Image (cartoon, coloured by chain):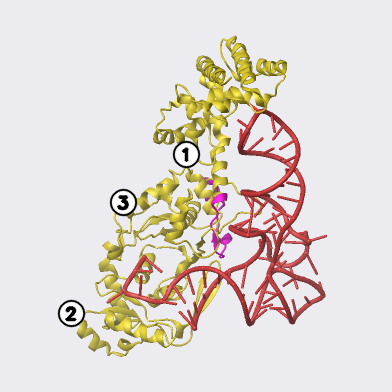
RNA sequence: GCCCCCAUCGUCUAGUGGCCCAGGACGUGGCCCUCUCAAGGCCAAAACGAGGAUUCGAAUUCCUCUGGGGGCACCA
């Protein structure tokens, strides 16, 4: 396709502090889409400057989640790239250098206040109903004096020297100009006393050094947006295009997703976490499709999109700043849509692990045959074993009472089964085409309804009251097994007479 | 408490001054199809938060209010 947009360099920058959830999955997706459609680069950067919050295995989980969604990055900690390293914990010296520079330029200053004192100040302010902020004690220190204290090894942080007066205007691509009163802004800490940069500094430096053209991130960054812009401006760097995505609200629409909500969701058979979605039976394309349409839309009627569709159609100009309540019912709908869009072959492959997990030996050949007849009967893939397990079992065990058709007696039901057996037994092979017409004729002469007779057979052959189409199912199961199962049913019915 | 953002059917959304007594989708109800269950088709109910202002004309622009959300850490 033709594209007038210049190549975008974007980054997805999660911190490895927990499981990757749908909100960050969407952020990653939008970044990826912009990169791919403009022929730019999608960079994965791990923001692990907070050593205390690291979670073992979280980084690996990020890789797996992104891969599962089908989002491949062009540069990252695992594959390297021209702006290495891509793990912020390995970029400590870079941040320190820029931190020093900030102080030298007079845009930042050393602060020696202890965490204890800060906590007390905050407490005091809150008691007085003031908004918590740094009181500016060290801002007044003589810079040379402060530098000397730092040289002697005194514990310190670096703070940003926020302008005290006037306003700062920043531009968000979806919201336009946002004006902050500088007097409401705080002298944020940029560099911790352990020598690690805080997010604000580290991200700004990295975004600049890595040549990021578009920062697409969550709206939780809106309150500190001015700080980030100001850091860029202090260094004289060009600002990227900023896009702040709305948050996902819990299904009720009341508040954003919390840990508690996440647990509740899981109890309901849903999950907010990417890693759970595969085993719950969701297709990556469905996740991508669903999540893309929360906060973005193409036009007034298109809803079905695959990843390549989205690469072509996505646009940051159509991003919606309003928060969106997550809707799992619609997720199910999209999953069904994507399941039905799969070829028999693809669906069969997708189904293999679910049968395995259910302890059912499902051969590929049969799986390909049943795929077309169970395709429109599933909402999630994990339903397949329950729906189609009978294809793979040596015998089924119907509930005897289910064999008695509604409106018929056990005797009548047994007769229907016997007569059906006779008709089917005359066939050298059962196919949907050759079995259905004579069976319909039989039902006609019997004088009962299709639903009654076919219902008996359905339970007899599949062991279930609900199943894929009867004769297609019989064809796949095979004549001998079908007859054996009907015989078993007849025996069962006769015992109830 | 302070700062920032947001505001169309229950939910996701289209809509950028007249094409809108507001369109699509999920869900809901009904009908059709039908061997069960689905899928599919058709139909229906369902929204511009309130008040001002601008304009010949406002869902669309501006203001106020209300409501919702986010943030206020040596977390990200």
Residue A190 in percent (x, y) is at 33, 75
Say whether residue A241 is left or right of residue A111: right
Look at the numbered disc 1 and give the secondary structure of its residue.
Answer: helix
Between residue B30 and residue A138, name the one nearer to us. Answer: B30
Real-space CA distance between mark 3 and mark 2, rounded to the nearest whole angstrom: 36 Å
Between residue B26 and residue A85, name the one nearer to us. Answer: B26
Where is mark 1, residue-wise?
A: A382
Q: What residue sits 49% from the left and 25% below the top?
A: A397
Same chain, labels 3 and 2: yes
Q: What is the drawing colour of chain B?
A: red
Q: What residue sits 68% from the left and 24% below the top?
A: A450
Magenta range = A307-329
Taking the magenta stretch, the answer to whether it contains residue A483 is no
Look at the numbered disc 2 and give the secondary structure of its residue.
Answer: loop
Residue A18 in percent (x, y) is at 36, 58
Where is mark 3, residue-wise?
A: A78
Quadrant hosting residue A324: bottom right
Q: What residue sits 60% from the left and 25% below the top?
A: A404
Residue A70 appears in the figure: no
Which chain gets the yellow colouring? A
Residue A110 appears in the figure: yes
Query: Taking B75 as reference, is B33 above or below it?
Result: above
Query: Taking A138 as reference, is A411 above or below it?
Result: above
């Amino acid at each position: 396709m033709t594209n007038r947009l210049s190549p975008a360099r974007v980054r997805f920058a999660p911190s490895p502090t927990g499981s990757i959830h749908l909100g960050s999955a969407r952020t990653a997706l939008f970044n990826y889409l912009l990169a791919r459609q403009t022929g730019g680069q999608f960079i994965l950067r791990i923001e692990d400057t907070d050593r205390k919050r690291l979670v073992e295995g979280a980084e690996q989980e990020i890789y797996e989640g992104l891969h599962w969604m089908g989002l491949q990055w062009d540069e990252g900690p695992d594959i390297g790239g021209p702006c290495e390293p891509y793990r912020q914990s390995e970029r400590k010296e870079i941040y320190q250098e820029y931190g020093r520079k900030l102080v030298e330029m007079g845009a930042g200053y050393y602060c020696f206040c202890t965490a204890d004192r800060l906590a007390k100040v905050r407490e005091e302010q809150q008691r007085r109903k003031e908004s918590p902020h740094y009181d500016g004690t060290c801002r007044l220190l003589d810079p040379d004096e402060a530098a000397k204290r730092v040289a002697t090894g005194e514990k310190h942080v670096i703070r940003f020297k926020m302008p005290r007066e006037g306003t700062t205007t920043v531009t968000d691509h979806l919201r336009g100009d946002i004006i902050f009163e500088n007097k409401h802004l705080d002298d944020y800490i940029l560099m911790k006393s352990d020598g690690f940069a805080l997010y604000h500094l580290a991200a700004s430096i990295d975004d600049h050094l890595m040549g990021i053209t578009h920062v697409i991130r969550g709206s939780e960054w809106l309150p500190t947006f001015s700080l980030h812009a100001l850091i860029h401006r202090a260094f004289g760097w060009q600002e990227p295009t900023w896009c702040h995505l709305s948050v996902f609200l819990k299904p009720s629409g009341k508040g954003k997703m919390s840990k508690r909500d996440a647990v509740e969701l899981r109890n309901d058979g849903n999950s907010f976490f990417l890693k759970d979605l595969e085993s719950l039976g969701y297709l990556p394309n469905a996740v991508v499709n669903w999540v893309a349409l929360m906060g973005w839309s193409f036009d007034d009627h298109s809803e079905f999109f695959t990843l390549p569709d989205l690469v072509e159609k996505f646009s940051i100009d159509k991003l919606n700043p309003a928060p969106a309540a997550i809707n799992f019912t619609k997720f199910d709908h999209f999953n069904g849509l994507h399941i039905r869009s799969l070829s028999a072959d693809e669906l069969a492959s997708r189904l293999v692990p679910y049968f395995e997990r259910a302890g059912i030996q499902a051969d590929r050949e049969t799986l390909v045959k049943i795929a077309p007849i169970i395709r429109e009967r599933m909402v999630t893939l994990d339903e397949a074993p329950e729906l189609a397990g009978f294809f793979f079992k040596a015998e089924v065990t119907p509930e005897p009472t289910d064999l008695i058709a509604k409106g018929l007696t056990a005797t009548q039901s047994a007769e229907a089964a016997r007569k059906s057996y006779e008709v089917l037994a005359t066939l050298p092979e059962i196919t949907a085409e050759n079995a259905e017409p004579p069976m319909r004729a039989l039902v006609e002469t019997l004088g009962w309804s299709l639903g009654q007779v076919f219902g008996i057979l359905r339970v007899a052959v599949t062991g279930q009251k609900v199943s894929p189409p009867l004769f297609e199912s019989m064809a796949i199961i095979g004549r001998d097994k079908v007859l054996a199962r009907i015989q078993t049913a007849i025996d069962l019915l006769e015992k109830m007479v």
